[in-house]
Amino acid sequence: MRERKRVYILLADGFEVIEALAPIDVMFRAGVDVVKVAVGGSLEVVSSHALATLHCDTHIEECDFAQCDALILPGGNPGYVNLRSNTDVLDAVRRAYDSGKIVAAICGAPTVLSAAGIARQRSLTCHSTVIEQMGDYRYVGGNVVEDGTLITAAGAGVSVEFALAVAARLVDSDTLSRTRRGMEV
């Protein structure tokens, strides 16, 4: 049995740099294992605006989603569109949510939840440009919204707050406090 918590972060070409790197950094600081999962043909995933390229650990087709405690979906355009249009992503999101795992989405990525057909009627937030795509969810606005195992965030500006909300579900309060102090938040 593994002792450390494990997060899978799904990365597609066009991801928003800070929305991916803030959770990766916060999880590392909190002692949570992060698996960078490539969605698409290459383990090299290029961010929106081609600002950064991340080398992923594995392809989505090779993942055992039963081995993660949380699934993180960064936004970015066209990153969230690429996530939303991938059937493996939609299947992974459904399985994670149905098995009670944390599903966390930021910016445009909450639209992936809608495409996967999960968490209907749950409260959430998202980027203002995709509110109308959220259908029968309860958009409540704000920076970070938690509803059951669902965590959503508005966008790039709240990436660290979003990552800390996910970490708070995975580590004890002392570890979270040390992580926050180390980051001066």
Image (cartoon, grey):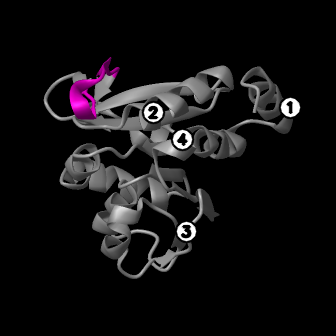
On the image, the x and y values in percent for residue 79 come to 26, 43
Going by the numbered disc 1, the residue's amino acid type is Asp
Q: Does the magenta run of residues contain 52?
A: yes
SS at mark 1?
A: helix
On the image, the x and y values in percent for residue 146 come to 62, 61
**Separation of residues labelled 4 and 2 (CA atoms):** 6 Å
Q: Which residue is mark 2?
A: 18
Going by the numbered disc 3, the residue's amino acid type is Gly
Mark 3 / mark 2, whichever is N-terminal = 2
Determine contact: label 4, label 2, CB under 8 Å: yes
**Separation of residues labelled 1 and 4 (CA atoms):** 22 Å
- Residue 16 drawn above or below residue 147: above
Tell us which disc is closer to us: 1 or 3. 3
Say left or right for 140 vs 94.
Answer: right
On the image, the x and y values in percent for residue 104 come to 50, 51
Q: Nearer the viewer, residue 118 or 179?
A: 179
Going by the numbered disc 2, the residue's amino acid type is Ile
Q: Quadrant of the N terminus?
A: top right
Q: Nearer the viewer, residue 54 or 92?
A: 54
Which label belongs to residue 159? 4
Q: Which residue is mark 1?
A: 174
Determine contact: label 3, label 2, CB under 8 Å: no
Mark 4 / mark 3, whichever is N-terminal = 3
Give me the residue at 39% from left, 27% from top. 36
Give me the residue at 34% from left, 50% from top. 92
Q: Which residue is mark 3?
A: 141
Give me the residue at 55% from left, 68% from top. 141
Mark 1 / mark 3, whichever is N-terminal = 3
**Separation of residues labelled 1 and 3 (CA atoms):** 29 Å
